[in-house]
Amino acid sequence: MLELPAECLVVSDLGVFRLVRETVHAAAFSGRSGGLGLCLTIDPDDWSFRAVLTLADERWGQAETFTDGSSFSLAGAVHAVGDWLDSLATDDYLNDTERDVRYLDTACGKVAYYAYNVELAKTPVLFVHGGPGGESSPVRMRTLRLDRPVYCYDQLGCGRSDRISDLSSWRVENYVAELRTVIEKLGLREVILSGASWGAGLITAYIERYGTDGIKACILPSPFLNSQVWTDDQQMNFKLMPATFQQEMARCVREHDTGPAYHALMREYDKRFLFVQPENAPIADAAGDAYSDVFEVLWGPDENVCTGSLQGFDVEPALTKLEMPVLFVCGDSDEVTLPTMMRYRGMVPGSQLAVVPGAGHATAKDQPVLYQEILVRFLRDL
């Protein structure tokens, strides 16, 4: 008779499935993830197995079936089924996030959000995107393959969320209140908060305002916590650029030139400190072309000198309130310099710092596999 556990976990880009044995004596497991149902049946005689993915999601035209000759163990079957599901997770399927989006009503408009692996029981992670003026990355959040519920949302004025009616009066406090509403309306009584760059600043501003109740851990990649520190770090990075770049950037700053010449320089800079992998060069080019209206109001038209409402922004003191597990992450060619990251780590006793090789400020985009492994390792016991 097969010795089988009560449940097993199948991990894939389609979703993370918690499969539970149907009866004590059966060699069949079933579970759901993201609107898809998965059944796994083991043959007790030769460890052969059969997996069936049901058509609960309307993007599937029919149920999918997979049979393998033998697995020799439950772990072997689970691994093979995960590989099979990954083969079905085409770019067309994963990028069709229009069907995944949901909305929350807030005081200032509808906020778009995404939820994956909600059937799992561990403490959920809520991802807070960067910018300001960026948007969430639902495909990346889904394909992190975390064994817990994963949520992300578009801040107002961003992505699929409503536009802000009076952007000129919008402040950090509005986004802090929005984050509070998102946490409450999603029912996240206990949550792990993860935010990169501006997202880290927003999380830390939230903690400064509301404290740490219900926050089980924080993940803060390449954090923007102080507008002056950010400017100082950029000046340090400029010194690593070619002399012609430094001379022309000095002219732009002196003459308040934020036109085409400035954006051309920022495209060079972004390829050195934002996206460093060659395949991401087109993204770096696009990033250096123009900035969103939210970014220009909160920060300003010059990415290196704050003239917007974030002028004087400083939530560094709130780091001393973080008594839960904290993970800092940065790239080895990050816009946030390593001395700044080391200082932040020193402000949070017991925190961890992971420096990712071959990555800029957009660490998760430059090194997605390493980034995923770092998060999985940190979250393993939470």
Image (cartoon, rainbow, N blue to C red):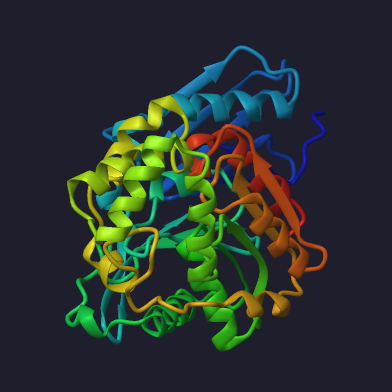
* Closest to the observer, 372 or 317: 317
Judge whether 95 appears above or below 2 on screen: below
For the residue pair 215 and 358, the one nearer the viewer reads as: 358
Q: Position of residue 362 (x, y in %)?
A: 47, 45
Residue 110, horizontal then vertical, whole percent = 26, 75
* Residue at x-position 32% and y-position 58%: 253
Relative height, residue 325 to residue 79 (above, below): below
Query: From what the image shows, is residue 214 above or below residue 369?
Result: below
Taking the view exactly as shown, the residue that stands out farthest to the top is 69
Q: Quadrant of the N terminus?
A: top right
What percent of the width, then of the height, locates residue 331? 59, 43
> Which residue is rendered at x = 60% and y = 23% of the image?
80
Taking the spot 48% from the left edge, 64% from the top edge, the residue there is 199
- Residue beneath the point at 25% across and 51% down: 98
Look at the picture and state if 83 lies above or below 40: above
Please indicate, yes or no, whether residue 156 appears anywhere in the rendered image: yes
Total marks drawn? 0
Q: Quadrant of residue 121?
A: bottom right
The foreground one among 185 and 7 is: 185
**Would residue 58 be seen by someone viewing this image from the given angle?**
no
Residue 295: x percent and y percent?
30, 65
Q: Quadrant of the C terminus?
A: bottom right
